[in-house]
Amino acid sequence: MSQVVLLGVATRMSVWLQPGSGAPGEAAPSPSPSPMLVPAPGDLARYLEENPQYANRVARAAVNTTPSSVLGWVVLGAVLAVAWFVVKHLAARAPEGRSVRLYRSCDPWVQALRTWFTTAPVTFVYVATWTVTTVIFQGTPDMLDSMINRFNSTNLVGVLNDPVRVLFSSAFIVADYGFFYIGYVVVFALITARLEQRIGSARVLLVGAGSHVLGSLLTVGVEAVAVHLGMLHKSIVVTQDVGVSYVMVGTCGAYLFLVSAKWRWWFRAGLGIGVVLPLVVQQSIWNLGHFLATCSGIGLYLVVRRWGVRERVTWRSLVASHPPRALPTWSAAPSGAAATAVGGQS
């Protein structure tokens, strides 16, 4: 993304470098009918070397202080996946050994994990989508991060001028540039996925999207009233307010009615600490948004539950129902079978 900054600077500098162009700050000459060419990287580097004041601007614009922590988690997941295929390969090549014992102990868990993913496709496709956007944001210069985030937030200006776009785009941006990324993943994997397993993909999409939209619109309405009454500073109309957390708390509110008796009070306490307590301690517009999105999720679940709820899926039952699979064999086929196969193909 830093190339975008340099390209923007290069485009402006190409105007200044054209014959007859004035220095920066002077009145621009009449546009030439010939197309403007962006200077080559070598020309740009030479120009920045000769004009250190612009080099400093480019350096400040390209600063990125956000650590690429999410990319590290993605790489770790890829390494674990490759390691599993290596274990399968070694176990197939050596029928007796540690690799076989490791395969037999881990394969039920791998099958259960695959079933967990496939029974909640909307949840995990959504997680994968905002994982990609978070990796992009964490690799973007801070100035562009803030600008892109602000122009895709469900703030008062965005909702009034381009409501459909900001409501859609903000739903795929994680707040604080993915600082609590792993916490988001855990909540979606353990709670939102369970909600989808109980009510289905279509209804979890309705609850999640509805919580985001209703929570955002209600928050913007409160913002407008508060700014009009002088209770909030006018700068709040362009604040950063993105919606992955709105979807998360909305689905958590919906799952409130499906928690087993063993965990019900723990879940209620966790939801109260995560949503209600911050609003009581610090009455910020973002905490209010989370509270309103949670209430929206509760209300939407009360509407969609009339179409029935599926049986609860437990991790223990998934592991128990998946015995280790037979390993593929790598031994060569007998010569007679091979000859038959060749004759049949001919």
Image: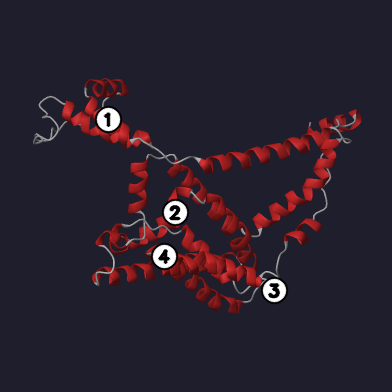
- Amino acid at circle 4: Gln
**Which one is closest to the eye, mark 4 or mark 2?**
4
The quarter of the image holding the C terminus is top right
Q: Position of residue 25 (x, y in %)?
A: 12, 35
Please report whichever mark, 1 or 4, sits nearer to the chain's N-terminal start: 1
Dividing the picture into quarters, in which one does residue 264 lie? bottom right
Residue 56: mark in rendering: 1
Q: Position of residue 191 (x, y in %)?
A: 61, 63
Q: Does dot 2 land on a helix, a strand or a loop? A: helix
The quarter of the image holding the N terminus is top left
Please report whichever mark, 2 or 3, sits nearer to the chain's N-terminal start: 2
Q: Position of residue 123 (x, y in %)?
A: 57, 58
Please report whichever mark, 3 or 4, sits nearer to the chain's N-terminal start: 3
**Which one is closest to the eye, mark 1 or mark 4?**
4
- Disc 2 vs disc 3: Cβ atoms closer than 8 Å? no
- Amino acid at circle 1: Asn
Q: How much space separates mark 2 and mark 3, taking CA atoms?
A: 32 Å
Residue 175: mark in rendering: 2
- Amino acid at circle 2: Ala
Q: How much space separates mark 2 and mark 1, taking CA atoms?
A: 29 Å
Q: Does dot 4 land on a helix, a strand or a loop? A: loop
Determine whether, in the image, residue 302 is placed left or right of residue 329. left
For mark 3, what is the residue?
Answer: 261
